[in-house]
Amino acid sequence: ASEKAQNRSAEFAQVWNQIITSFRSEDLISN
């Protein structure tokens, strides 16, 4: 069970990083 939770958190972290990076790039472009 713990391994599944770790995999879920790792996948979520990767997706979150991509979202933050896209937001930052959009901000840089708009500015």
Image (tube, rainbow, N blue to C red):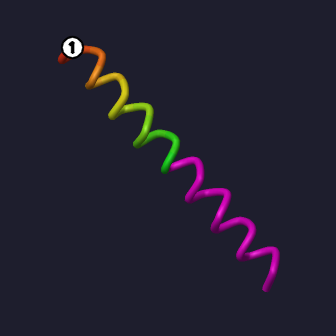
Residue 3 location, quadrant: bottom right
Q: Residue 5: within the magenta?
A: yes
Q: Which residue is mark 1?
A: 31
- Farthest residue toward the bottom? 1
- Farthest residue toward the front? 31
Q: Could you tell whether 2 is left or right of 13 in the image?
A: right
Vertical relation: 23 (above or below) 6: above
Vertical relation: 15 (above or below) 7: above
Q: Residue 2: within the magenta?
A: yes
| Residue shown at 27% from the left, 25% from the top | 26
| Residue shown at 47% from the left, 39% from the top | 18
Secondary structure mostly seen in magenta is helix
> Nearest the camera: 4 or 23?
23
| Residue shown at 58% from the left, 47% from the top | 14
Q: Where does the image place residue 23, in percent across and percent down from the top left?
A: 33, 34
> Nearest the camera: 23 or 18?
23
Assign a secondary structure to mark 1.
Answer: loop
Residue 22 location, quadrant: top left
- The quadrant of the rendering that contains the N terminus is bottom right
Magenta region, residue range: 1-15
Vertical relation: 7 (above or below) 5: above
